[in-house]
Every structure is written in C-alpha cells, then in structure tokens.
Image (cartoon, coloured by chain):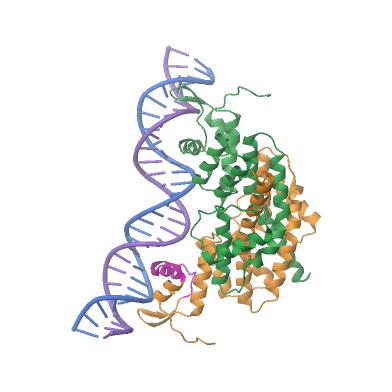
Chain colours: A green, B orange, C blue, D purple
Amino acid sequence: MLSREVAIRISELSRTSGASVATIKYYLREDLLPPGGTTARNQAVYSQRHVHRLRLIRVLREVGGLGIDAIREVAGALDNPRLSRHELLGVAHRAVSSPAGHAPEREVAEVDALLRDLEWVISTTAPDRGELARALASLRALGRDVDARTFLPYARAVEPLAAFEVASVSAGASDEAALEATVVGTVVYGAALAALRRLAQEHQSALASGPAG
Amino acid sequence: MLSREVAIRISELSRTSGASVATIKYYLREDLLPPGGTTARNQAVYSQRHVHRLRLIRVLREVGGLGIDAIREVAGALDNPRLSRHELLGVAHRAVSSPAGHAPEREVAEVDALLRDLEWVISTTAPDRGELARALASLRALGRDVDARTFLPYARAVEPLAAFEVASVSAGASDEAALEATVVGTVVYGAALAALRRLAQEHQSALASGPAG
DNA sequence: ACAAATAGAGAGTAGCACTATCCATAAGCG
DNA sequence: CGCTTATGGATAGTGCTACTCTCTATTTGT
C-alpha cells in the first residue's frame, strides 16, 4: 500500500528485471506480460504487478527452463484465476512436463500399478505417468532388468515433501498468490531438489572413495 | 557371448534405435558414437557396443534433455575410462547441470553454510552449489523471505537415495559399466524423481481438495 | 548387370528465443 | 521552444542447435 500509483516505464521494467527493452516488448507481443495502460498512442504505464510478473517469467525461463508457450499457459491461468487449487496444480505440472510424447503402454500399465500400490490418487491425464513410464522403458532399453518397484524408495522419499508443499500453498492467501506459489514451488524447488540430490551423491561418493580419495 | 562377430550395418543401427541414418551419421561426425571398423572405402561394420551406445545417446537426449556437447563429454569419458569413480560422477554431474551461469555470491555463501551444517563434503567446483544458490536468489527475487534452511528437508529426503545410488554403482562391475550406471542413474532416476514428486503433489492436492473435489 | 545401400562431406532447414531496425509520436530538459 | 531521448508497435533479421538433405564414388546383394 505504500507505493501505489507508481507509473513505471518500460526502461525501468528493463532495469529491475535484467531483460532488455526489446525482450520485454517480445513478451508483451507473446502475451506473457499483460499490456500496460496506454495513455497515448505511443505511451503506456506499467505497475508493480508488471515488475513482479516479469521476474516470474525470467525465473521460469532461467531456473525452470520453461519455453515461451509453457509460460504463456501459466500466465494465462494467472490472469484468469477461475480454477480450483487442484486445477492450478495441473496447469503448473503441464507446464514443466515435456510435451507428452508417446509413452510405451506396457510401462504405463506398470506405473499405474505402482501408483495403485502407493494408494496415490492420480488423474489419468497426468503427463507425469508417461514421464515415469518413459524413464522405466529407458532403463530397460539400456539392458537393466528393473520394474516399477525400483521407484518405490523415490516415491517414499518424496511423499512428505509433497505433503508439506501442498499444505503450505493451501495455507496461503488469494487465488493468484496460490497459483504463483504452486508454480514457483514446482519449478524452483524442483530445481533445488535435483541439485541437492546431486550434491548428496557427491558427498556419498567422497565418503566412499575415502578421505584419501 | 552368444552373438559375437555380428556385423551390423548402419541401417540396422537405425532400426534398433529409432534414429534416422542421417542422424547416426551426424552423431558419428560429432564424435558421440565411435566410428565403425571400415572394411572398404564406403563400408563399415558396427557392433553391439554401437547399438548400446546409440541407445544411451538417445536416452540422454530425450529423457535427460542433454545437449550434444554434454553427451560428447560423457561419451569421451566412456571411451577413456582412466578416471576414479568419484571423478566419473563429476563428469555426469557437469553434463546435466546448466553451464554454470554466474551465481549470486551472497546466496552461494549461504548454500555453503548449509552444506557445512549438513556436514556434506562438496568440492568447490561443483556446479550444483551455484544451481542451488540461483534457486534461492530466485525465491527472494519473487518476494519470498527465505534462507538456505528452507532446503533442509529436501536435503534430508534425498540423502538416503544418494547413499543407495552411490553404493549400488560401487558394487558394480567394470569402469565403463560404472560410468554408464552413474550417468544413467543421475539422468534417468533424476527424471523419475522429478516426475514422482509431481505425482505425489497431485495426490496430496487431491486429498486436500476432498473426495468430492 | 543393376537396383539399393553405404561412407563421407558439405550445405540446407526448422524451431526457438530473442534482437535490430523503422516510424510516428511523446516526454524530458535547458 | 527546440532538441535529444524514450516509447509503442510492427516487421524483419539473427544466432544457435539438432538435425536433415543432397551428392559422389563406391560396394553389395541378387
């Protein structure tokens, strides 16, 4: 409430985000960023929301590696929050998952069986079923004799994290804030989790190779 | 030992991998795939190793999303395995981490402090320190008031997985097999972990939104 | 004998995320 | 007031990556 009515111009938007003016215009054209209020044929004013949105876009691109299309989906949901919390999560997940390339049927069935064992309630449209199936099929293509149960310890490790994450979003405020928290959580904590796993591997490997390694 | 001396031609390599002949030639040119034994000016024979290597390349590209340069690094290490197990892990990690873009100093220091608290032994050249620091800085750029301790539960969740993974590779056979196991483990199980986390989120979200959700 | 496959090399292509250039206008400033 | 600078909007161009195509001189299989 402190700084209302601050009319921001595109050059300042550029300064606070690190994106060039040309890039911001590009995002505007691509509907990642809502247009500013036009005050004349060639003049528009932007707000703190634009600053924030732009930072979000950059994080999704640079940390999350999302493509422009995926970010547009997220931005669309953000500007039209008539979705339930659960649906918002679906938007976020579809944005980060790869575009659903065909998944091998046999492995999908096995993944579904695993999810049933876990008693996880998963929609049949979740792209991550295919993602997991493809991982399983890859292991087999490389000659590993594994089944879906290989993933069980991973599922168990991730269960409490997911519970915490979902709970902390639900506790949050408005719908828009909730979607943003969901997207940021999925993308940024996802990147952090991957990095931490590798760091943990390095530590374990250092231990295994001995202090004189 | 059953099928030794099977002279495979490029078209069969293509059939068993799904990659076009032109793509395989491209991989050959780019040194991802070692050349076949040439039996005449325009004739070469490939082996089961080529079949396997090609499958590995495709998995690294499609599941792991690795670029050609990163795959070349891995392939190079695979063909010249004079590295310790611990060094092999470094090769794998550098291949999957993004190319080390500048990381914010303040956050790197905080990440290092976290690693010290965890008593993890991490090389100062590990790219994942920067990765994690960037995640932390991103959260702050988006207005979240967090510190590196936010990541503690993630670190704890991932510790037993890493221990298991490192142990199961060490138990393995030859150096080449060990590197491949390391790379595949890092890439494929990494993808699986990310997918499982999202599935777990979906489950928790379904629970939270109630059976009537 | 002859259609089909091959190695190798170079050029060409598609998709993506910008980036540069223009123009007509508007803002800021001495 | 005049003049430099910034702006919005539109179109075209760029750099990069991972292929894909084309071509030639063979060699193969039938």
Q: Give the vertical position of A61 relative to A129 (above or below).
A: above
Rendering coords of residue A165 (x, y %): 70, 47
Name the side, left or right, on which A209 lies relative to B63. right
Name the side, left or right, on which A139 lies relative to B10. right
Using the rendered image of the protein, determine whether residue A213 is visible from the camera's viewpoint. no
Q: Give the vertical position of B192 relative to C27 (above or below).
A: below
Quarter of the figure with residue B21: bottom left
Rendering coords of residue B189 (x, y %): 63, 63
Q: Give the vertical position of A38 relative to A196 (above or below).
A: above
Q: Give the range drawn in magenta.
A: B17-34
Quarter of the figure with residue A109: bottom right
Q: Does the magenta stretch include residue B173?
A: no
> Which quadrant, please, contains the C terminus of chain A?
bottom right
Using the rendered image of the protein, determine whether residue A156 is visible from the camera's viewpoint. yes
> Which quadrant, please, contains the N terminus of chain A?
top right
**Which residue corresponds to the image point at 64% horizontal and 79% vertical from the top-left?**
B174
Name the side, left or right, on which C14 lies relative to A7. left
For the residue pair B38 and A35, the one nearer the viewer reads as A35
Rendering coords of residue A22 (x, y %): 48, 37
Q: Does the magenta stretch include residue B31?
A: yes
Rendering coords of residue B66 (x, y %): 54, 60
